[in-house]
Image: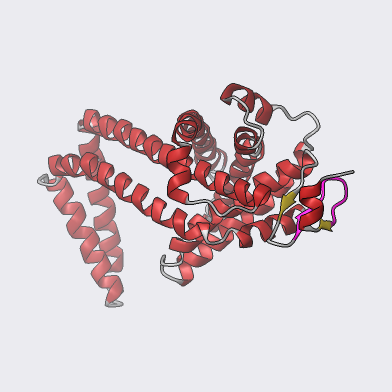
Amino acid sequence: MEFKHSFHVFVDNFSTTYKLLVYRLIVLAITVGLSCAVLVPSIGCISDTVQYTDLQTSVTALWSDLIALNTADLQVRLQDVKDAFEAFNHLLSDKSWLVATVVICMCVVYVIDRFLVGVGNYVTGALVHDKMVMYTRSSFTITLFKNIKQASIYAAILAPLAFVYDAICLVIMWAIISVGLKGLSFTLIKIFIVAALFLVFSAVKFAFTTDWLPALIDAKMKHRKAICYTFSRKGKKTLDVLSNSLVLKLTVFALNVAAGVFTFGAGLLLTLPASSLILSSYCFVNYFDRNKQKYFVDEYTVIGPKKDTPVSREEFFKGDE
């Protein structure tokens, strides 16, 4: 029933998607601006080199032949791109200091982006919580400024932890693909394995952080206690939560891929913030169900703490006798 209740909560809070979209666009503008500040000067250092010019020319020629369906010189074009890319790699090896600086700066930009996204996720969780507990339509902006301290601490803790976890997962996937499956020549199988590993790693991270936001927002726990609570799996049916997390992540992944492919990326403007909203909805539904708390799934339906059946608004506010 958690999926059903989570979906109802998601639909009932759907207007939050548009507020989160505006916030995410602001975050995207900040991230792009910081990335350009790092990349543009770096590209300027190598844009005048012969290796960069040859790579750009060979890629442009290959792309022009592909568009014109000119396959007569395709093998030659591919070899030119390969040779130019190898020469460009030698150039980057000579400028290893520049590459290392760019990588470090982009990692910092990524952490900043995750921090800002984490603040937005906290505010989204607070809005979902207000709707589920009191059926109150709170303002995104007011909620943001009201909870900016708590949201910032939450994001400041989560962002570096998520970065380290993601980096470890990338290293594991790279090792499996480049070493374990080095002799495998089927590219599609490699893509399938990468996608499967991505979903599993993402589901594991979500399963072990599901209770973090509800513990902070609903239980008013301190950050240290909330972290201990979310990683403490006693009585939390970890396998069930992990299974639900995998299904949710698969659904969200498929939805975003479909939106990206069939709408040429335009649909992602809606599906990405909606994905965060439905994940937040599941977190609070899972937390409330396990702690036997009552909550609204829509304006007229409340899920009771003892039986998984709806109760009226009057019964909800009256309480158990």
Work out whether residue 37 or residue 296 is closer to the camera in this orientation and state it.
Answer: 296
Residue pictured at 29% horizontal, 33% vertical? 105
Instruction: Answer above or below: position of 222 versus 188.
Output: above
Verify whether residue 305 appears in magenta: yes
Work out whether residue 234 or residue 66 is closer to the camera in this orientation and state it.
Answer: 234
Residue pictured at 40% horizontal, 35% vertical? 111
Work out whether residue 92 or residue 147 is closer to the camera in this orientation and state it.
Answer: 147
User: Measured from the top left, where is residue 79 in percent x and y?
Assistant: 28, 57
User: Measured from the top left, where is residue 177 in percent x and y?
Assistant: 53, 43
Location of the C terminus (image quadrant):
top right
Furthest toward the top, the residue is: 224
User: Measured from the top left, where is residue 56 in percent x and y?
Assistant: 19, 56
Furthest toward the left, the residue is: 48
Instruction: Answer above or below: position of 301 versus 111.
Output: below
Res. 3 in view:
yes
Work out whether residue 92 or residue 249 is closer to the camera in this orientation and state it.
Answer: 249
Furthest toward the right, the residue is: 321
Q: Relative to residue 181, is residue 219 drawn left or right? A: right
Type of secondary structure dominating the magenta stretch? loop
Q: Which residues are magenta?
A: 301-309
User: Measured from the top left, where is residue 239 in percent x and y?
Assistant: 77, 40
Q: Relative to residue 305, is residue 268 drawn left or right? A: left
Verify whether residue 138 appears in magenta: no
Q: Relative to residue 312, is residue 284 drawn left or right? A: left
Residue pictured at 85% horizontal, 53% vertical? 308
